[in-house]
């Protein structure tokens, strides 16, 4: 119902709206949210990603060279490409379809491209990766 | 943490560009303060002429408005001229007493117009042509007065004269030398230019030296300008005099601060002055003895300077080759490099006086060192690229004057002249970008390089076939600011300053075997590289040290990691190998069963004589491969793709050689061969060439007496006919020659260069010499290829048996 309003807000205030929209959608669409254990950190290749099936659709969980983990909806804001399949470098991933660079920490496209992939919370505890959905 | 303080003096294109580049790399390093003597934010100075001519407005030429400074937390002081740099206290002082302290100082003070040392230059109505103020003064004068004299027949003078004429004044250009723009044009081109400007109504006085400017006060020395008096005693009435006789780097402030200046502020290759805290860029500097008066080199300087200011520490500025393009609508003129001639130079001239076309290229040692184009400048960017790359042209000399034969073959309605295209015509057929959109982006976003245009508009960023057109549009829109991309010695990517060749050499000479080690050894700028350099490094490692170097799947593009082609919806396509395009009932049955079992939505015959199963889910891939029980077709890899064949002498009534079996032998010989890019072969059994072998990386054509081998053809983005390499007699020889050629390409080609690019770079003569004439070398090349392929597994068979299973499994929360 109020989806268009969110979309409008996101366009109007750019970067800030992106993270905001993510949390709004989560609250309205998901009934139960919480931390879910995914896998051992080592089950995600360094500079790579794994795909998690979820009620939100596929979620890409990335691991970079410094063993930081990030989670984004597995859909490039450009044409919906599966970001999980891209090349990970620094704190970015290059979408496999048309090469947009997406920031892993907030889901935003690197300028001059504009767009945002929804972000999820993810953490590592005692070598286990936990995802909040 | 306390930020460092960066102060910039001069708010022009070079300085602001440097800030932009630096903010991209390191947005939070400095607290930035900018002093500009003009009351305006940063504007595109090279577009002042179109403003004067009434073709653009001031608003359209702003590059960075005040909001930009605010958004980047830059403290901007407009209308404040810095009068002193106190290097000991590390602060700068403005005329109004404003001060600012610095940790790093960036001088971008530009240049000043040169004023002739003659009486009368201070009179009302005598102006120079340098900034918005001058432009406005000319526009204002044109509305009130009738007669203008422009002193100086160079680029700026002619653009000023043209603009004043268009605004309704009678204009005479006075020039000291024998012909116009003598530093950029030869006599022929200059006289053609003069004629066309005369046709527009401009008058010229050549070989004329100005002696004095006379005022309307009684003593002739005050008031407003009344006339210009020449050394020969003659006089010309004038209400406006524009002095455009050259510029001088503005070094006054630097000199007063004790910084070493020569023709300009002397800087090193890292754009540092003799005080290492102080950097300088733009028209105010002298680098290796040269002060550049054009805008193009500024961007290269800006990039290098920004890199060092940001503590990124890579990149050196090593000088620029510059080109000129006159921005007078209706006059097409391009000049670059050195065309003064000389005993050791040769010239190629094409002159059509009636058609108004003149092209002159100056060559030395088979390289283009200069050129003048008049009337038809379509190929200006192409020649400039040859010049900059120092490309050996002896193989293309016979058609050099006719320009680049193909700018691209498809996707832009057959157009190859950007100037002839309407704004709404599509330039980039991949991304749907029309000419007008590109021009608009170049002007509004202040783009100057092909990369910039690609990033902002996406034009030519996919298949690249319209690159030539986009370059033309860029060159004609930014004029003299156009600088072709460095292709000869370009770094692999932004993470390093090393070229592809340097990277390969380091890997070979220092026996580097893994990406982290290679990056560390070559001091890569970013620890995990980027999506451009990692795949290249991975290929260079495994091709240099087969069976030794460590293959890194995470540095391969997804297709090579998953061993299937990713599709737009995230599913994959599977193309099993069919040797030489042959198959059997058993294989076809298995394919049919797989399609049913995995509910594969589309089955298609490919252009390479195989079957494509499209829409396979990633998690199904290992099962599909197991059930197919066919070898990988590598349709997804920078590797040997297909060997296309015709039926040949076994069945065909025209065939003179058994092309099908020759193709199968080649394919089995080269199967699993990775390369800088995809590799396609074809074998035809007679010169009718039904397998279209002449547009393949290696094409083999059977003739009665043996086989002809062609190399470096291409049928895709840019159709290129393969070139004849040699003729051989036996199947074994075909395998050896084709293999040796491909191994040479594997060892020397740059990652993502097809054979056509590789051969264009090194020359067919070189390839012949290494592969055909040098028997020992050919055998050694072929032996190295055989060694590399020995024991290389079939990736599908391994994965069908359970290898790399994680790649294909999904997680559940």
Image (cartoon, rainbow, N blue to C red):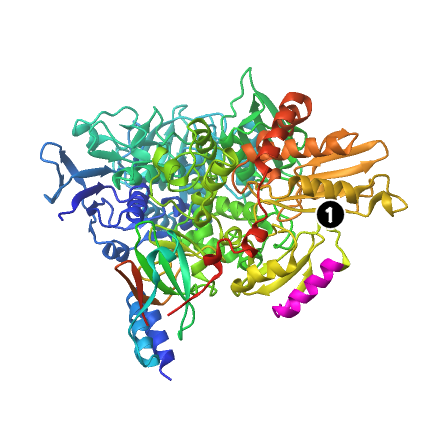
Q: Position of residue B307 (x, y in %)?
A: 30, 39
Q: Quadrant of residue B756?
A: top right
Q: Classify residue B607 as left or right of residue B243.
A: right
Which residue lies most toward the top here? B343
Q: Is residue B153 magenta?
A: no
- Element assignment for label 1: helix
Q: Classify residue A20 as left or right of residue B505.
A: left
Magenta segment range?
A: B586-602
Residue B578's place in the image compared with A125, above or below, is: above
Tell me which residue sits at (78%, 38%) in the image.
Answer: B701
Tell me which residue sits at (64%, 32%) in the image.
Answer: B741
Q: Position of residue B731 (x, y in %)?
A: 76, 34
| Residue B530 appears in view | yes
Examine the residues drawn in magenta and state their main secondary structure.
Answer: helix
Q: Classify residue B759 as left or right of residue B505.
A: right
Q: Position of residue B612 (x, y in %)?
A: 65, 59
Tell me which residue sits at (36%, 42%) in the image.
Answer: B239
Q: Residues within 10 Å of mark 1 (few under 14, many from 20)?
A: many
Query: The C terminus of chain B appears in which quarter of the rendering?
Result: bottom left
Q: Quadrant of residue B758?
A: top right
| Residue B115 appears in view | no
Tell me which residue sits at (42%, 72%) in the image.
Answer: A57
Residue occupied by mark 1: B580
Q: Quadrant of residue B293?
A: top left
Q: Is residue B597 magenta?
A: yes
Q: Nearer the viewer, residue B19 or B724?
A: B724
Q: Name the subunit of mark 1.
A: B
Q: Nearer the viewer, residue B43 or B39?
A: B43
């Amino acid at each position: 119902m109020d989806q268009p309003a969110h979309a409008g807000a996101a366009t109007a205030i750019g970067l800030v709206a992106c993270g905001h929209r993510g949390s709004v959608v989560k609250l309205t669409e998901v009934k139960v949210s919480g931390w879910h254990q995914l896998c051992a950190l080592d089950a995600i290749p360094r500079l790579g990603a794994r795909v998690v099936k979820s009620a939100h659709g596929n979620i890409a969980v990335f691991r970079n060279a410094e063993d930081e983990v990030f989670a984004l909806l597995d859909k490039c804001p450009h044409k919906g490409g599966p970001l999980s399949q891209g090349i990970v470098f620094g704190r970015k991933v290059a979408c496999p379809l048309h090469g947009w660079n997406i920031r892993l920490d907030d889901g935003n496209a690197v300028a001059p491209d504009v767009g945002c992939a929804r972000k999820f919370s993810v953490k590592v505890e005692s070598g286990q990766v936990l995802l909040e959905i | 943490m306390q930020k460092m303080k960066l102060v910039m003096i001069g708010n022009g294109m070079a300085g602001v560009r440097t800030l932009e580049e630096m903010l991209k790399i390191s947005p939070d390093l400095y607290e930035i303060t900018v002093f500009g003597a003009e009351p305006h934010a940063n504007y595109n100075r090279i577009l002042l002429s179109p403003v004067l001519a009434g073709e653009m407005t001031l608003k359209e030429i702003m590059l960075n408005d005040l909001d930009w400074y605010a958004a980047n937390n830059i403290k901007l002081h407009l209308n404040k001229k810095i009068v002193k740099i106190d290097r000991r206290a590390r602060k700068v002082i403005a005329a109004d007493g404003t001060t600012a302290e610095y940790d790093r100082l960036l001088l971008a003070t530009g240049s000043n117009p040169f004023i002739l040392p003659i009486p009368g230059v201070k009179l009302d109505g005598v102006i120079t042509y340098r900034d918005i103020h001058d432009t406005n003064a000319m526009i204002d004068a044109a509305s009130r007065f009738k007669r203008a004299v422009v002193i100086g027949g160079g680029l700026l003078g002619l653009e000023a004269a043209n603009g004043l004429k268009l605004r309704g004044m009678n204009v005479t250009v006075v020039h000291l030398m024998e012909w116009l723009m003598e530093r950029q044009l030869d006599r022929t081109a200059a006289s053609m230019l003069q004629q066309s400007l005369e046709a527009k109504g401009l008058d010229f006085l050549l070989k004329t030296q100005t002696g004095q400017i006379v005022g309307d006060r009684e003593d002739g020395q005050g008031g407003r300008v009344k006339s210009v008096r020449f050394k020969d005693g003659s006089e010309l009435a004038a209400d406006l005099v524009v002095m455009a006789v050259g510029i001088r780097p503005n070094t006054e402030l630097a000199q007063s601060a004790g910084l070493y200046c020569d023709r300009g502020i002397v800087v090193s290759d890292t754009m540092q002055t003799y005080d290492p805290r102080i950097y300088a860029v733009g028209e105010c500097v002298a680098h290796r003895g040269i002060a550049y008066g054009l805008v193009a080199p500024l961007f290269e300087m800006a990039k290098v300077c920004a890199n060092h200011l940001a503590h990124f520490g890579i990149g050196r500025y090593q000088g620029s080759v510059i080109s000129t393009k006159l921005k007078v609508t209706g006059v097409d003129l391009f000049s670059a490099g050195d065309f003064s001639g000389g005993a050791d130079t040769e010239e190629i001239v094409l002159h059509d006086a009636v058609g108004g076309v003149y092209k002159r290229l100056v060559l030395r040692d088979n390289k283009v060192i200069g050129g003048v184009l008049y009337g038809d400048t379509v190929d200006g960017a192409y020649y400039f690229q040859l010049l900059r790359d120092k490309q050996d042209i002896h193989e293309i000399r016979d058609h050099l004057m006719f320009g680049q034969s193909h700018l691209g073959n498809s996707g832009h309605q057959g157009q190859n002249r950007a100037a002839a295209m309407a704004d709404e015509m599509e330039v980039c057929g991949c991304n749907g970008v029309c000419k007008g959109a590109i021009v608009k982006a170049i002007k509004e976003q202040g783009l100057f390089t092909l990369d910039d245009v690609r990033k902002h508009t996406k034009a030519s960023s996919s298949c690249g076939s319209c690159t030539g057109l986009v370059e033309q549009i860029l060159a004609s829109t930014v004029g003299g600011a156009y600088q072709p991309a460095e292709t000869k010695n370009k770094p692999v990517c932004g993470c390093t300053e090393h070229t592809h060749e340097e990277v390969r050499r380091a890997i070979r000479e220092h026996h580097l075997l893994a990406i982290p080690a290679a990056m560390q050894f070559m001091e890569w700028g970013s620890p995990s590289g980027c999506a451009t350099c990692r795949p290249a490094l991975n290929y260079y490692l495994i091709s240099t040290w087969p069976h030794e170097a460590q293959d890194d799947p995470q540095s391969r593009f997804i297709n090579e990691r998953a061993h299937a082609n990713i599709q737009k919806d995230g599913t994959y396509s599977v193309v099993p190998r069919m040797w030489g395009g042959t198959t059997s009932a058993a294989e076809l049955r298995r394919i049919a069963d797989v399609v049913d079992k995995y509910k594969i939505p589309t089955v298609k015959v490919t252009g390479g004589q195989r079957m494509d199963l499209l829409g396979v889910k990633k998690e199904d891939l290992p099962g599909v491969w197991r059930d197919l029980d066919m070898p990988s077709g590598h349709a997804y890899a920078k590797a040997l793709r297909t060997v296309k064949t015709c039926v040949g002498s076994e069945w065909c009534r025209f065939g003179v050689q058994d092309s099908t079996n020759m193709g199968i032998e080649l394919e089995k010989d080269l199967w699993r061969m990775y390369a800088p890019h995809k590799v396609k072969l074809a074998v035809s059994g007679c010169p009718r060439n039904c397998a279209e072998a002449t547009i393949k990386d290696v094409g083999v054509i059977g003739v009665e007496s043996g086989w002809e081998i062609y190399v470096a053809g291409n049928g895709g983005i840019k159709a290129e006919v393969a070139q004849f390499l040699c003729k051989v007699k036996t199947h074994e020889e075909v395998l050896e020659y084709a293999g040796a050629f491909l191994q040479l390409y594997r060892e020397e080609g740059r990652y993502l260069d097809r054979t056509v690019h590789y051969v264009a770079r090194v020359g067919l003569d070189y390839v012949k010499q290494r592969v055909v004439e040098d028997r020992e070398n050919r055998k050694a090349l072929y032996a190295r290829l055989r060694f590399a392929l020995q024991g290389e597994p079939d990736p599908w068979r391994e994965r069908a048996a359970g290898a790399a299973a994680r790649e294909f499994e999904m997680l559940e929360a």
